[in-house]
Amino acid sequence: MKLSCINFFFMIFCSVFLLKAGAQRSCSNQCGRSLTNCSCRATCESLGICCPDYWAFCLNISPYSGTLLGGKDFTILNVTFDSSSDIKCRFVQEIVTSGYVAEDGRAHCISPLLYQTGMISLEISRDGGQTYPHSSVWFSDHHSKVAPSEKSTLVNETQWQYYGTPGTGGELTVTWNDQTLQASHVNIELWGYQETGQPYSENWAAEWKYLYTLKENASNTGIFTFLPAPSAAYSAWELGALRITSSGSLEGQSNVAAIWSSEHALAWHLEEAFREDSAAWAAAKCHAWDAKEMGLPSFLTEIIDCPCTLAQARADTGRFHTDYGCDIEKGSVCTYHPGAVHCVRGIQASPRYAAGQQCCYDATGVQVLTGDSTGGSTPDRGHDWGSPPYNKPPRIPGFSHWLYDVLSFYYCCLWSGNCSYYFKHRPSSGCKRYRPPRAASAFGDPHFITFDGTHFTFKGLGEYTVLESHLTSLRVQGRTRQALLNGTEAKVTGFAAIAMQENNSDVVEMRIPEHSNTLEVLLNHRAVNFSEQTWMDLKGLFLYAVPGLSATVMFSSGAGVEVRGSGTLLGVTVLLPGQFLGHTQGLFGVMNNNPEDDFTLRNGTILPSNSSSSSSSTSEQLFAFGADWAVRNSTSLLTYDTPHLLHSFFYGPKHNTSFVPVFSPSEDPADPLQKEMALLCQTDPFCRFDVMTTRDLAVGNSTKWSHQNYKRLKENLQPVVSCDWLALPTNGRKDSTNYLAGSVVRFCCNPGYTLAGSAERTCQSNGEWSGDATTCFPSAGTKQQPPFGTIFGILGLGSLAVLVF
Ligand SMILES: *[C@@H]1O[C@H](CO)[C@@H](O)[C@H](O)[C@H]1NC(C)=O
Ligand SMILES: *[C@@H]1O[C@H](CO)[C@@H](O)[C@H](O)[C@H]1NC(C)=O
Ligand SMILES: *[C@@H]1O[C@H](CO)[C@@H](O)[C@H](O)[C@H]1NC(C)=O
Ligand SMILES: *[C@@H]1O[C@H](CO)[C@@H](O)[C@H](O)[C@H]1NC(C)=O
Ligand SMILES: *[C@@H]1O[C@H](CO)[C@@H](O)[C@H](O)[C@H]1NC(C)=O
Ligand SMILES: *[C@@H]1O[C@H](CO)[C@@H](O)[C@H](O)[C@H]1NC(C)=O
Ligand SMILES: *[C@@H]1O[C@H](CO)[C@@H](O)[C@H](O)[C@H]1NC(C)=O
Ligand SMILES: *[C@@H]1O[C@H](CO)[C@@H](O)[C@H](O)[C@H]1NC(C)=O
Ligand SMILES: *[C@@H]1O[C@H](CO)[C@@H](O)[C@H](O)[C@H]1NC(C)=O
Ligand SMILES: *[C@@H]1O[C@H](CO)[C@@H](O)[C@H](O)[C@H]1NC(C)=O
Ligand SMILES: *[C@@H]1O[C@H](CO)[C@@H](O)[C@H](O)[C@H]1NC(C)=O
Ligand SMILES: *[C@@H]1O[C@H](CO)[C@@H](O)[C@H](O)[C@H]1NC(C)=O
Ligand SMILES: [Ca+2]
């Protein structure tokens, strides 16, 4: 479903008309005007141009995003309503919430509870729901990704989450912004989350339910303090959140304006038995969870292995993303992963069970494993971000993960000392099956480095297939424009726009608009506003942006595309996992470990790869190679929303044959720029090339920087061999937790024990340990000592604070 600018009814009505190619030109003159002719509408849409009458249907709203728990009041822009209008908003074509018209004539609606994240269709009615003539888009956010200022705050969350365990007690306090709700009095309610039905069966369902009111008609002062009492009736609800609403709404009424707290373990309202002996109570829960897990299918073999090293984990941006709970760029505050400096999460949920992977690394750059440390990375039965098609467990964003992976961590690890039960079902993954992705890159006036490492420069003017793969119908296309030489157009080009799609995903395009040097991101041909969120769950992909600077697309297949704006040109890097081997074509070449066939034309002809040498005839041959990969009219993903783009690229040829670039700039020793260039570029040929052709050191510098980045990426993605985890011998110790090739692990036994097997084992390049298994047996004639204890073992978990799991 393409949501932007399309009225659903109209789309159905229009789709019976066929788009005639000949009509395109006459239609395009009409784009931008009110259209009643369907074929013209379709033309305008295919050009990525929204007509004004589309805009009448496609309204903007503000704010455009909020928590999936709902309760957000938003304003409908662009159109005013008279006060007698009966406003209704319909989400995902079925969930209806009531709106109202404010004094200024603006209509408002309240976002509903949704069990999904991402872009949600929104339709607006002014006649009480009989017709829905307006449409728009709502972004539903993961509850823990919503800004803290949008929520109510549980003061001292540790106290809330450990309430009832030894040494806790007293009053609990919640605070909120008293301006958010236009009300003098509020109700403070508790809502609970549960899942019903048989796991992995049809009737497995999610439920957020109103439980009871903590305080009715409290004055809206922004603070509420109470002494929690154990609840017998609702003790079975162990996960929930507080909701603050205007006292004008009924208790428990759904989809009214509200301020939610973060979701949390409801320790503070659990039954009396918990307060009497929380450790025993939690241990019993932990054992029940353990028994339940044994009856559930194992997801461990299905999830992706972790990268072996921190460098790999941070470089593999198509498949792994920083875990906000332990981020090296935010000072490594790793509350739940003591000993780790950085964690990443596998982006995609596993195909069948929708499970998630987490990988943590220590300061030496190797993985922290649960076999050695409570800070080890743990996989998740429910991926924290949920996964399409959402709506049913275990795919509910955030909350499914809480039920299977976080509450059980409380039972086993935090409220009782039974963490080994947790790690039995959630062991860290090794990295033996991990294969780093392959990278290709293009930058400057564009220099290309293919997946197999072939370098070349191609300066065509037009739109080209950077990469295509039939494996997943992945397409990455780039449009070039002439680079500027001292303010005028130079005889070289650079990327100005990169558009991409996989299978039937949303289309994402990054570009630098004319007369601008700020990166713009388009989603299905419309500019995206990143003011409320920088991470978006979209159809078939995730989009992450550093506004104005770079954007990364992570496709379902694990393919990652990163685009950076550097001055007036774009650089693009594509990461492809191993399954794409032998399945790519285009300017980034045939990815098959053979650099010789990277210059393969569409018809299969292979140009010799030493045409990359600098002699001009072969450069021209290469130019023909690039030209051959010009985008075809019918399959372009790019947007043509200005007269210039329409004229040059939509009605003009995709490859401009009349533009002949400079193939090899001459370096004149008398040129004053020469010295500065040599200083900046040193031996980097791409940098030298770009300075000489654009006469701009800044262009050269950004090329040099992109080239260095690529080389660093390539280095970080080097495959690493890993051996299996080595247990420490009973009654003994080991001195290392590094299991990568070349690493040596030394063993010794506790006093009174003698070592058998190897005292020292080396991880060999074939992934096998040298030597034999190590054991410690009681020495003859000595009394048996109590076990030395696990040196890397259970740390003081009870002291752990706020849960950012
Ligand atoms: C729509 O406009 C096109 C181009 O102007 C024209 O060829 C076509 O006949 C029109 N169709 C209708 C239904 O009016
Ligand atoms: C982006 O969204 C914010 C918040 O909804 C709004 O204030 C701002 O005007 C929007 N910017 C653009 C360019 O639409
Ligand atoms: C709709 O309203 C927004 C914000 O007021 C504005 O930026 C946008 O241009 C408007 N669109 C139209 C078509 O009027
Ligand atoms: C938070 O609560 C815990 C447990 O009740 C307590 O030990 C701690 O001192 C409290 N912290 C603050 C800052 O009040
Ligand atoms: C709430 O309390 C205020 C003042 O204490 C009172 O005027 C009002 O009627 C009450 N509202 C409800 C819904 O009980
Ligand atoms: C489970 O935890 C309880 C309470 O901390 C403890 O008494 C018990 O020994 C633990 N059981 C196991 C098997 O570790
Ligand atoms: C492409 O999308 C269709 C429909 O969403 C899906 O059934 C199919 O498996 C996808 N193909 C690939 C290669 O991902
Ligand atoms: C750039 O243009 C300015 C004025 O147009 C001129 O004075 C200057 O010499 C030019 N510089 C180069 C390096 O061509
Ligand atoms: C493939 O295309 C190239 C360039 O268009 C042409 O020179 C060559 O003859 C073609 N080869 C085949 C086998 O069609
Ligand atoms: C490179 O060029 C030489 C001669 O120009 C040719 O003999 C050789 O086969 C070429 N190598 C490749 C890999 O195309
Ligand atoms: C693409 O469209 C343009 C403009 O309509 C046309 O000139 C060109 O011949 C078309 N190219 C192909 C391969 O159909
Ligand atoms: C080159 O670019 C880097 C990174 O953008 C910047 O830190 C550096 O100052 C630039 N150097 C010059 C000489 O412009
Ligand atoms: Ca190849």
Image (cartoon, helix red, strand yellow):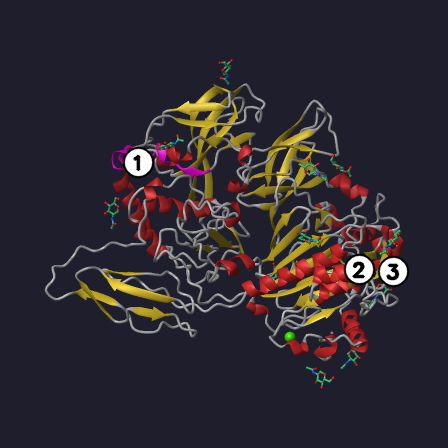
Does the beta carbon at disc 2 come under 8 Å from ligand 8? Answer: yes
Foreground: disc 1 or disc 2: 2
Amino acid type assigned to the residue bearing label 1 in the image: Thr
Does the beta carbon at disc 3 come under 8 Å from ligand 1? Answer: yes
**What segment is highlighted magenta in the picture?**
263-277
For label 3, the residue is 22
Q: What residue lies at 67% left-to-right and 56% top-to-bottom?
A: 563
Amino acid type assigned to the residue bearing label 3 in the image: Gly
Of all residues, the one furthest to the left in this rendering is: 781
Q: Nearer the viewer, residue 182 or 128?
A: 182
Q: Nearer the viewer, residue 400 or 300?
A: 300
For label 2, the residue is 673
Q: Nearer the viewer, residue 84 or 668?
A: 668
Q: What residue lies at 78% left-to-right and 74% top-to-bottom?
A: 619
Label disc, if present, on residue 165 of the rendered structure:
1
- 287, above or below 74, in the image: below
* Disc 2 to disc 3, C-alpha distance: 51 Å
In what quadrant does ligand 13 lie? bottom right
* Disc 1 to disc 2, C-alpha distance: 72 Å
